[in-house]
Amino acid sequence: MAAQERRVLTRHLGSPDLTSLAGYEAVGGYASLRQALTMTPEAITEQVRASGLRGRGGAAFPTATKWSFLPKGVFPRYLCVNADESEPGCFKDRVLLESNPHQLLEGTLIAAFALQASHAFIYIRGEYRAQRELLERCVDEAYRGGYAGASVAGSDFACELIVHGGAGAYICGEETALLDSLEGLRGQPRLKPPFPAVRGLYGQPTVVNNVETLSNLPYIVEHGGDAYAALGTAASPGTRLFCVSGHVERPGTFEVPMGTTSLADLVELAGGVRTGHRLKALQPGGGSMQVLGPEHLDLPLDFKAVADAGSSLGAGALVVMDETTCLVEVSMRLVDFYHHESCGKCVPCREGTYFESRLMHRLEAGLASSDELATLAEICEHMDGRCFCPLGDTATWFVMSAYRMFGDEFRAHCGAGECPVRARGRRVA
Amino acid sequence: MATVAEAAGTPAASTGVLSHATRERIRTARARYPSPRSAALPALWAAQDQLGHVPAEAMAEVADELGIGAAEVEAVATFYAMYFRRPPGRHFIQVCTNVSCALRGADDLLRHLEQRLGVADGGTSADGCFTLESTVECLGACGGAPALQVDRYSHEDCTAERVDQLLDRLRAEGAGS
């Protein structure tokens, strides 16, 4: 069966003037919010639970469960929307922010009502300046249209919507660093527990949800959680917006049902591996996740199946690499990225990424001895699981998995060796 | 560099580097948050939008508006990569060299820009028109790799020819203003 998209999140794309309030209302926008306001917060949470929706930011935590951690009777509470999308290879939230910002605002207000949050903050990365300005315009429209502020859609529920622009720090996608950044501090992660649900923004109960996660809520409220769950499989319900980039004919985002779609289907939707080339490696979940090989193409987009293969669907970003790719060079770029983005709070990450980066540059330049590969493995071992937050842990995952899968390529770079890919007259770029 | 003590003594007069309009933007942002300090990032953006960068005087004035120390504002301003300490060129070009762009020719694109502008990565062209920087933080434009961002807008599926046209257009706009 040919791979097919199933448009739920993206069902309105192409409708005229969708980024304006009038355009969004014309496709039924904000009707789900009105419907939600007639329900009890608990009933909404129940629908979300029935939908099986899991966080789309990378950690895949069940959304309704996250909501249920808020302590009863403690107010004010806050909702934070994580629009700090910065995972290498990931650009799906940007698509949702650019193409249907009111859908995100509606989902945000539904969640805020379910949580009884007084404020919803949308934290958007600094690089998305144009998208931030669009979002700010939409928030103004939502206020003028009566969907935000003192009386949300004429109800007695009040909620302020605030767009907060970041300023260039990958770490702020980590939820507690995001909270510090929102409080006007350097964006560094907090010790957990207490988790944000108990003590988050300004020390109050807080939920942090991803853009895509919240953009699903209008559909779930309108059609019911069961209808959403029926879109995928029991273990991986719903649809998901996947980004496909790298060596494919038509990079882009594709919305597909989870579970029943495979990695190969995604590659096919993106036009296949570029003509005249063959697949060498895949990264299924963005820069933080482990590499997979062509033998994994048949894996379904299922949380467990991909985890069992030693990787993760992460933030939903599939990076495709053909035979012209040097995995040492790709590893070096990713290690450089984590080194640059390490916030400096904890030693294993701050120092570990420094040494990782230094070593990968030596390896790439043909200066490293084979002993240094053992050092690299040792450094990574000292980092993984020992860093203050996942940034440092994940800084080891790609490089170590690439070393395991493409050990010969790494070894060939040692001791004045030559990159076997480049020796064949090709290089990554 | 303004010290905390100097900042504390700075009157909230309009004689500083921040314009009345910028101060109004900061006050509007401040009023929106449950805590004034939360407006630190928006305030620094407002300052940079006006001045093109965030000098120490601006940090002190932001601190004054938010009722926090200048050192606290400086700690924030220096943590985030997008606040400039020194004035950049009129246009800021970021070339994404993360994996998805690298797989599709980002290094060649960067070399071309360096040559065309006569600057090394991180430098500003002699006419002050462009500051060029390769960025290791993915720009979130992998679907149109190789991509770069000029000021607030991204440009995707970049080729040497398309980038040359873009530079010419931006130069012409600058000359006309």
Image: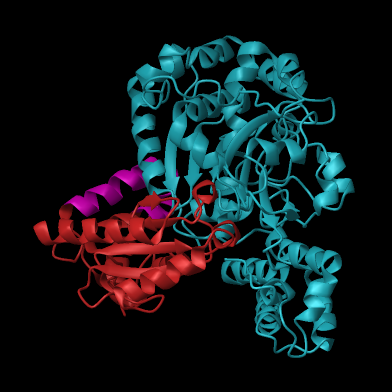
Chain colours: A cyan, B red
Q: Which residues are magenta?
A: B21-42
In the image, is A279 to the left or to the right of B132?
right
Vertical relation: A364 (above or below) B109:
below
In the image, is B169 to the left or to the right of A225?
left
In the image, is B18 to the left or to the right of A43?
left
- Residue furthest right as drawn: A308
Q: How many marks?
A: 0
Q: Main secondary structure of the magenta part?
A: helix
- Residue furthest front as drawn: A276
In the image shown, does B137 or B66 lie closer to the viewer? B137
Residue B112 on the magenta span: no
* Displayed quadrant of residue A24: top left
Q: Is residue B70 visible?
A: no
In the image shown, does B12 or A211 lie closer to the viewer? A211
In the image shown, does A397 or A170 lie closer to the viewer? A397
**Where does the image place residue A201, in percent across and percent down from the top left?**
57, 46
Residue B34 on the magenta span: yes
Q: Is residue B52 visible?
A: yes
Residue at x 78%, y 36% (from the top left corner): A262
**Where does the image place residue B175, in percent across and percent down from the top left?**
12, 61
Residue at x 65%, y 81% (from the top left corner): A361
Residue at x 56%, y 31% (from the top left corner): A117
* Displayed quadrant of residue B73: bottom left
**Where does the image place residue A259, in percent across and percent down from the top left?**
80, 31
* Displayed quadrant of residue A74: top right
Instruction: Locate the N terminus of chain A and report the quarter of the image it occupies.
Output: top right
**Where does the image place residue A135, in percent across and percent down from the top left?**
40, 36
Vertical relation: B82 (above or below) A360:
above
Instruction: Locate the C terminus of chain A and report the quarter of the image it occupies.
Output: bottom right
- Residue furthest left as drawn: B176
Vertical relation: A361 (above or below) B132:
below
